Image (spheres, helix red, strand yellow):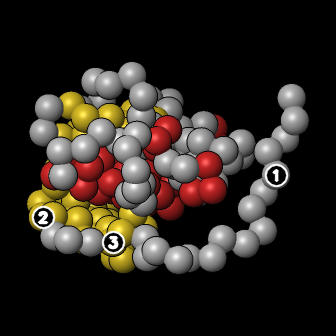
Amino acid sequence: MTKKAFQDYYPDELSYCYGCGRLNEDGLQIKSHWDGEETVAIFQPRPYHIAIPGYVYGGLLASLIDCHGTGTAAAAAYRAEGREMDTEPPFRFVTASLHVDYKRPTPMGVPLEIRGQVEEIKRRKVVVNITLSAEGKVCATGKVIAVQMPEGIVLKNLPNKKQA
């Protein structure tokens, strides 16, 4: 695994996502890395990510699948072009489609492993298949169709970084 996560390469102005934005202090801040030909992220749910006692809220699982998928798409695009993730111009992908299937209840109190496999890479589109597991058992699967963020998107009302 690399030391720096895919999401750590996102430009500051594109790092506020609730799921994967490193500049969103209240967000999940997931961190995805290559593990051979797959990508992996580990996430520890907090007690407030509860659905019913003992189990994780399904919306959290969808968010993890979504953000791991778009991070994987960006990393795969760089890899396909033979580029490092810190090279210009930056690739940033957004979700065009998210499909999630819940396979079994996801237990609280254990780390979740999110793994991605790239199914397809086209010019501005990457399709990623995701599995989310707890204690070695698949709890949810998903498919993310990610598209490269269009150039010229106007970013408004960016949050100010809090001063330490």
**10 Å crowding of disc 1: few (<14), some (14-19), many (20+):** few
Picture coordinates of residue 120 (x, y %)? Answer: 12, 64
Query: Gap between marks 3 and 2, in whole Å?
Result: 12 Å
**Does 109 appear above or below 18?**
above
Q: Are marks 1 and 2 in contact (CB under 8 Å)?
A: no
- Count of numbered labels shown in the rendering: 3
Dot 1 or dot 2, earlier in sequence: 2
Picture coordinates of residue 45 (x, y %)? Answer: 53, 38
The answer to whether residue 64 is left or right of residue 114 is right
Query: Gap between marks 1 and 3, in whole Å?
Result: 27 Å
**Does 20 appear above or below 40?**
below
Residue type marked 1 = Asn
Q: What kind of element bears circle 3?
A: strand
Residue type marked 3 = Val
Residue type marked 2 = Glu
Dot 3 or dot 2, earlier in sequence: 2
| View extreme (front): residue | 88
Which residue is denoted by mark 1 in the rendering?
160
Picture coordinates of residue 145 (x, y %)? Answer: 28, 70
Q: Quadrant of residue 110?
A: top left
Which residue is denoted by mark 3 in the rendering?
147
Which residue is denoted by mark 2 in the rendering?
120
Quadrant where the image shows the N terminus: top left
Residue under the point 63% across and 76% down: 154
| View extreme (right): residue | 163
The answer to whether residue 52 is left or right of residue 136 is right
Quadrant where the image shows the C terminus: top right
Instruction: Pick whichever, 112 or 51, lies toward us.
Output: 112
Task: Look at the image and tell me whether residue 127 can be seen.
Answer: yes
**10 Å crowding of disc 2: few (<14), some (14-19), many (20+):** few
Residue under the point 53% across and 77% down: 152
Q: What kind of element bears circle 1?
A: loop
